[in-house]
Structure formats: structure tokens, C-alpha cells
Image (cartoon, coloured by chain):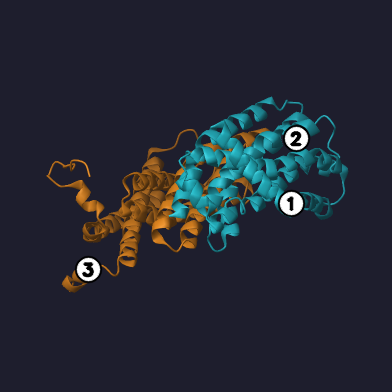
Amino acid sequence: MGALLRTVIRRDLLLAWRRRADIATVVLFFVIVVSLFPLGVGPEPNLLRTIAPGIIWVAALLACMLSLQHMFASDHSDGALDQMLLAAAPLGLIVIARALAHWLIAGLPLVILSPVLAIQFNLPPELSPVLTLSLLLGTPILTLIGAIGAALTLGLRGGGMLLALLVLPLYVPVLILGAGAVDAASAGLGAEAHLLLLAAQLVVTATFAPWAISAALRIAAE
Amino acid sequence: MTQPVLLAGGVNVFKYAAPQTFYPLAGKLIPWFSWIAAALCAVGLYISFFVAPTDHQQGESYRIIFIHVPAAWMSMFIYVVMAFWAGVGLTFNTRLSHMMVSALAPTGALFTFVALWTGALWGKPTWGAWWVWDARLTSELVLLFLYFGFMALQAGIDDPRRADRAGAVLALVGVVNVPIIYFSVKWWNTLHQGASVSVTSAPTMATTMLTGMLVMALAAWMYAIAAALHRVRSIILEREHGSEWIRNYAGSQP
């Protein structure tokens, strides 16, 4: 089981490393979207500080969505996906490994970048770790739920827009809890409740999403 | 197939799981549900406008609840029914269940839209705003997005079999998420504004008001069934237009 996880993750990471530009695109998209907001709403520091968690979170949602389109697409077109479906190893396990790899490629960079963007928005230093932690707990949920959508829309025309339509409403709780954690911390209420609920949602999603992703992949490959 | 389940009258339930036996049955049922819906709607609207008293706080504007509340109930209920048929369709691989899910989605979206629209009409005189980021309003809006997502997915897939099954997975994922969305939105709202505006106007309501609302809810129910049956018949015709039974059926009709 461990060997399988390692093999699949290493394969995905290697493929991603050979197409480094794709990772850079997602990260740049994230930074650019976040940087556009001050230009739109004005450079007033207090306002920016208030809206920073929400903006960074929404940008993370969109960046994650952008990267999800490619999650299964190339494997679907070159037949590697069919091999995975036919493999003796349980599909759910392969799916977990692939989601983990996708998160390492597309989710983790956003988490690591978030303190830098927090500085851009003048977020107080004590709130920056809360934002990072909320993203650390929340971005894997985005990957897992998004993977269901990516599998359902595999190979469809207009797949990207369709994916956004399917997945964004399901991201609402993650957005609320993630951005809410920072708001609660800045209001002096403590972010524990939000972060614990986010962690709970991560556990539930990680348990059930692989089933849905596997089912969706089987339907798409039929 | 397991042992056939027999109803009291000796009717085989599974017989109607086949589109060609369900099609004529639905055709016979549609007028019944339509007429009952029309009659209940007439009675309900009469009670709503002429029998139910004026509310002492909200005046006449409260009368929107006779449409608003049944629509909101149906919007949520239909999504659950869709998820149920989606589950049945995935488990037993019955085509008709999937067709039912597709047939219900537009009706559900319609009721969600009506609930939001009438809510806005009520909110303007009562709250002074067309739209408030109240927990219920927001989760209803997300529900509308879920309906749209489902319909967009089915419209985006050309192969009907894949569209059915992909839609079923989405409906099931959605129904698991609806409570999570509802509670997160509720929590988000209570965190931001202390005194939240509540949709329930009064703790108790006059019996005639309640009667009017329940009659309208039943009317909405009957309409939803009639509309779904009508749509399922169209879907059956569309999917099976080449098959022999449809040619025979069309030949036998005057």
C-alpha cells in the first residue's frame, strides 16, 4: 500500500516537475489576482486589512480551480487513466495518492506564499500564521472536492467553465471557515473553533471524496 | 432482479420501472395531478387573499408567504428527492430513475428561483432591502447554483448514459454538502451581524394563515409531480425514439 502511494505520488511529482511552467502559472495567477484587488478598491490600509483574508481565500479557490482542469486530463488523453482503472490496486488508493500529489503541486505553494501576500495587505503579524494554517487545512479540501468535479467533467467541451460551476458552490463552507478563522482571530475570539471545524471537514472529505472521485472516473472512462 | 414486490392489488411495482410501461401510466396520471394542483391552487389563493386576516405587524405584505414558503419547501425537498432517485439509479442501474432526476431538476430550480424572487419582493417593504446576506437567503442562493450546476453538467455531456450517471454522482455529492453549506452559512452570518433578520415573521400564526399555506404547499407538490411526469415523458420519447414500442404506441394512439 505504501509502495503504491509512493510510486503514484513520485510519478505525478516527476510529471509536474517536467512541466514546471504549469505550476508557475497557477502560483502567478494567485499572486496577480490578489494584487489586483487593492487597485480595484483603493489603497486604504484599514479596508485592505479587513478584506485581506477573504481576498486571499477567494484567489486560492480560483487558483485551485485553474489547476484542477489538468488533474486527469493528460492521463485521460494518453490512456494512462485506463491503466489505473484496470490496475489490480484499489482505485480509491490511487485517487488518494493523486490528490495528495496534486495538493503538493498546486495547493502547498499557495500556502507557502500566503504570508508574503498577507504582508502586502498589511495584515498584523500575529494573524499571518492563522491565515497560513487555515489555508494548510483548507486547500486539501479544495483539491479533494475539486477532483470530483474534474473527474465528472473529464473530456467534455467547455470543461473548465463547467468545472467552476459544479465545484464553486461546494467550496462555500471552506471559504467561510477559512476566511472566518482569520476574522475571528482579529476580533479576539480565537480561531480554534473555525480551524477545528475546517479540520473536521478535511477528515470527512478525505474519507468520502475518494469514493466519489473513483465513481466519477469510472463513469468518465466508460 | 430479486423477487417481484407485489402491492395489495397484486400489481408488480418493478413493471413500471421500464420506460415503456411507465410512459402510458404517466400519461394517465398527469391530468389527475394537474387538475388537483389547479383546484388546490384556486382554493389556496382564495384563502390567502380573502379569508386569512391581515397581519398586525406586516400588514398585507406578509401574504407573499403563501407562495414563498411552499416554494422554499419544495426547492429543498425536490433536491433530496433527486438525490434519492440518483442513488436508486446508481444502485439498481434503472434508466427511469435517472430520467426522473433529470426531469425534477428544472422544477426544483424553478421553485428555488420563485422562493428567492418572492423573498426579495417581501424583503423590500419589510427590511427595506431587496437582498440581505441572511443565512437562509444565502443558502437558498447556493442551492440554486447547485441546481444550475447539475443541469449544466447534464447538458454538457452528449452521451445520455454518462450524463445520467455523472449527474447522479453530482446530486449525491450535493445532497451531502447541503447541510454543511447551510450550517456554515448560518454560522458565518451570526458571526458578522449580531441581530440577524429572521424569515419567520411571528411565533404563532392564525389558523387560516396556516391552512392557506398548507393548501398552497400541497398545490405546489401536485404541480411538481405533474410537471416532472410531463418532462419524464418527453425525456422517454427523446431517448427511445427509435425503439419499437414507441412506434407501436404512436400507431395505436388516435
Which mark, residue B152?
Answer: none
Badge 2: few (under 14), some or many (20 or more) residues near its Cα, within 10 Å? Answer: many
Q: Quadrant of residue B1?
A: top left
* Residue A220 horizontal side relative to residue A202, left or right: left
Q: Residue B5: where, in percent of width, then height?
A: 19, 41
In the picture of the structure, the residue carrying the numbered disc 2 is: A132
Image point (59%, 41%), residue name: A8
Of tags 1 and 3, which is closer to the observer? 1
Q: Name the subunit of mark 3.
A: B
At mark 3, the secondary structure is helix
Q: Are marks 2 and 1 in contact (CB under 8 Å)?
A: no
The tint chain B carries is: orange
In the picture of the structure, the residue carrying the numbered disc 1 is: A20
The kind of residue on which mark 2 rests is Thr
Question: Does the rendering let one see residue B138?
Answer: no
Badge 3: few (under 14), some or many (20 or more) residues near its Cα, within 10 Å? Answer: few
Give the camera-side residue of A121 and A204.
Answer: A204
The kind of residue on which mark 3 rests is Glu
In the picture of the structure, the residue carrying the numbered disc 3 is: B244
Of tags 2 and 1, which is closer to the observer? 1
Q: Could you tell me how far apart the alpha carbons at marks 1 and 3 are, in whole angstroms?
A: 56 Å
The kind of residue on which mark 1 rests is Arg
Q: Chain in cyan? A: A
Image: B122 above or below A89: below
Q: Earlier in the sequence, mark 2 or mark 1?
A: 1
Image: B24 above or below A190: below
Please state, as top left, top right, bottom left or bottom right, where the C terminus of chain B lies in the image: bottom left
Same-subunit check for callouts 2 and 1: yes
Image point (58%, 39%), residue name: A97
